Image: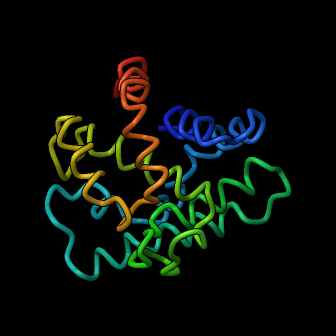
């Protein structure tokens, strides 16, 4: 996931040093899940309303955990932890940010995270084909995802598929 985020950042024009910070920070996007009970994290079915509210709290918790550092990678990680579930149209959480009000780090990691999650097996879902994952992501262009970044992602899909093949799920 981190390598997909880094590559997308570079394709979008981010300089190498900043893309390296993003690459280091991106894996911490879900650090706030340490505060979510395993029964919720590993639940095989759909979460109920209370469980979903608890699950959503991981974004704010992760940001709080990471926000007291002066290290560039941890500052970036705090932004990512808080904003990777914000949606381009404002329907995300925790702050309901929209468009360019979502930091670029959050917008990049949102794409990388969803691509990775959909193309991987999870306790609550089977692995999607990458074709189906990309079709879903394209449908969410301008809804969940930054339209320009999704266009860049899809236009360079072979590169991202190559990354997934180099770093398969363990």
Residue 170 visible in rendering: no
x, y (%) of residue 17?
78, 35
Q: Extreme right residue here?
A: 70
Residue 90 visible in rendering: yes
Position of residue 42 in the picture relative to residue 93 (left or right): left
Of the pair 170 and 97, the residue shown nearer to us: 97
Image quarter of residue 157: top left
Q: Extreme top residue here?
A: 166
State whether residue 126 is above or below residue 77. Answer: above
x, y (%) of residue 25?
64, 46
Of the pair 34 and 165, the residue shown nearer to us: 165
x, y (%) of residue 96?
48, 81
State whether residue 12 is above or below residue 97. Answer: above
x, y (%) of residue 90?
44, 78
Q: Quadrant of the C terminus?
A: top left
Residue at the image position 50 percent from the left and 60 percent from the top: 84
Q: How is the image coloured?
A: rainbow
Residue at the image position 59 percent from the left and 58 percent from the top: 80
Position of residue 78 in the picture relative to residue 88 (left or right): right
Residue at the image position 41 percent from the left and 60 percent from the top: 145
């Amino acid at each position: 996931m981190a390598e997909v985020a880094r590559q997308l950042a570079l394709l979008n024009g981010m300089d190498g040093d900043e893309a390296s910070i993003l690459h280091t920070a991106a894996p911490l996007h879900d650090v706030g899940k340490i505060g979510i009970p395993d029964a919720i994290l590993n639940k095989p079915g759909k979460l109920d309303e209370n469980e979903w509210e608890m699950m959503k709290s991981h974004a704010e918790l992760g940001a709080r955990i990471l926000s007291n550092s002066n290290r560039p990678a941890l500052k970036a990680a705090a932004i990512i932890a808080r904003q990777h579930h914000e949606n381009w149209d404002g329907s995300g959480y925790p702050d309901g940010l929209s468009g360019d009000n979502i930091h670029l780090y959050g917008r990049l990691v949102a794409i990388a995270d969803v691509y990775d999650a959909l193309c991987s097996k999870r306790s609550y879902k089977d692995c999607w084909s990458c074709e189906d994952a990309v079709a879903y992501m394209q449908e969410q262009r301008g809804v969940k995802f930054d339209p320009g970044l999704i266009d860049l992602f899809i236009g360079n899909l072979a590169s991202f598929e190559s990354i997934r093949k180099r770093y398969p799920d363990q």
